[in-house]
Image (cartoon, rainbow, N blue to C red):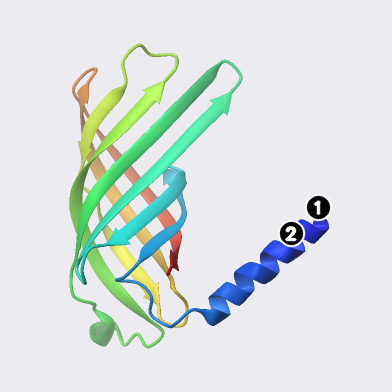
Amino acid sequence: MNKFFTTALLCISLSFISQPALAQQQGIGIGAMLNSPTGISLKGWVNNNLAIDGAISFSLAEGTSSFYFHSDVLYHGDAVNEDLNLEQGSLQVFYGAGFRFQWFDTQNDPIIGLRTPIGLNYGIHELPAETFFELAPSIDFSPSFRFSFGGAIGFRYYLH
């Protein structure tokens, strides 16, 4: 088992070193996000300002299980690097709209609604990676009408 973790760590380290700089705003990123939801995060760039992201999460516990999925279209504003004197990365504000789906085995009907995420995206120049923070007000339509807030922090690594 230790050989597996050592080999995996070596492969990940080598992939970070061999990637070209500033990989965000192109390609597909995969990573993790924490809070609401906590799960796997994906992001694909359509052009320099537009991206499609999504998250998937599931929980298996004794007596209950759940599944969560959302997808958003995100518009990224101009980088605010010069205003903040950032040299090691690129900070952008983003906002968008999307949908969410959540299922609990203890409920008969799934929860379906709309999301409007807004947040900050920090692309790291030396790595094909980014960190992000988002808040996402949501309106659920099914099985009943309700308003809620979600939010998460996360990290994505870009594949080429």
- Quadrant in the picture for residue 51: bottom left
Q: Secondary structure at mark 2?
A: helix
How far apart marks 1 and 2 lie (CA) works out to: 7 Å
| Image location of residue 122, percent across then percent down | 36, 71
Residue visible at 49% across and 78% down? 19
The C terminus appears in which quarter of the rendering?
Answer: bottom left
Q: Is residue 101 left or right of residue 56?
A: left
Percent coordinates x, y for residue 98 in the rendering: 21, 44
Q: Is residue 77 above or below residue 134?
A: below
Q: Amino acid at mark 1?
A: Met
For mark 1, give the secondary structure: loop
Q: Which mark, by number, is residue 1? A: 1
Q: Which residue is mark 2?
A: 5
Residue drawn where x is 22% and y is 63% of the image: 46
Residue displayed at 34% across by 57% down: 43
- Return the x and y of residue 2 as percentages of the image width and height: 81, 57
| Label 1–label 2 contact, CB within 8 A | yes
Which image quadrant for residue 25? bottom left
| Furthest residue toward front | 160
Residue at the right extreme? 2
Establish if 3 lies above or below 91: above
In the rendered image, the vertical position of residue 127 relative to residue 70, given as above or below: below
Q: Quadrant of residue 109?
A: top left
Q: Position of residue 12 (x, y in %)?
A: 61, 68
